[in-house]
Image: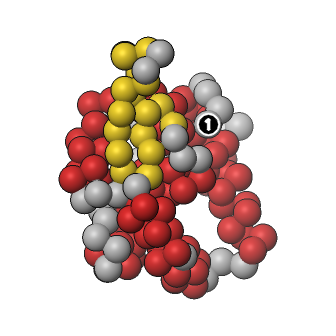
Amino acid sequence: MDQDAHHAAGQGSLLLQDQLCFALYAASRSVTTRYRPLLEELGLTYPQYLVMLALWEQDSVSVRDLGAALRLESSTLSPLLKRLEAADLIHRERRADDERSVVIRLTRAGADLREKAGTVPVAIGEAMGLTPEQDATAKYLLRLVTENVTGSRP
């Protein structure tokens, strides 16, 4: 591919609008900003919401497995869990058979919050304005980028 073709494809260009990383950054900020008022009604931040989504999908999970699912380091996840526990949405307990392992469980309030949160994906989906096919394609491509950059599957 010659120099002009590289630039036309956005490869090797130093123009801001040609950068995929900038498009990802701008989209991420815009979407997160759209989430903020919806999550404030639930008493959650965006990272806390992601933790709750993972727990609504699979309750009683180890901190290690939760971190892997969310792609978060323990140093980032621990403060989130501490705040969710203080809000009585989760409970952390050490496993009886392995004191080194901590299991996260939803409290009744945490489980009940799921129903109230059901409107969030609908509102965000409407704000994004994608067709179901575009939504599926966007998720596929973003997962592919993540896998390629990290060298691992989620």
Q: Residue at x 60, y 42 (%)?
A: 145
Residue 96, position as x, y percentages in the image: 43, 20
53 lies above or below 2:
below
In the rendered view, does 48 fall on the left or right side of 75?
right
Specify few, some or many for label 1: CA neighbours under 10 Å numbering under 14, 14-19, or 20 or more: few
Q: Nearer the viewer, residue 48 or 88?
A: 88
Q: Nearer the viewer, residue 24 or 73?
A: 73
In the rendered view, does 108 fall on the left or right side of 60?
left
Q: Assign a secondary structure to mark 1.
A: loop
Q: Quadrant of the image for the N terminus?
A: top right
Residue 59, position as x, y percentages in the image: 54, 47
Q: Residue at x 47, y 74 (%)?
A: 117
In the rendered view, does 61 fall on the left or right side of 137?
left
Residue 150, position as x, y percentages in the image: 54, 29
Residue that carries the numbered disc 1 in the rendered image: 154
Tell me the amino acid under the disc marked 1. Answer: Pro
**Residue 42 visible, this orientation:** yes
Q: Quadrant of residue 79?
A: top left
Residue 130, position as x, y percentages in the image: 65, 77
Q: Residue at x 38, y 65 (%)?
A: 109
Q: Quadrant of the image for the C terminus?
A: top right
97 lies above or below 84:
above
Q: Quadrant of residue 47?
A: bottom left
Q: Nearer the viewer, residue 65 or 7?
A: 65
Q: Nearer the viewer, residue 75 or 131?
A: 75
**Residue 18 visible, this orientation:** no
56 lies above or below 94:
below
Q: Residue at x 36, y 33 (%)?
A: 93
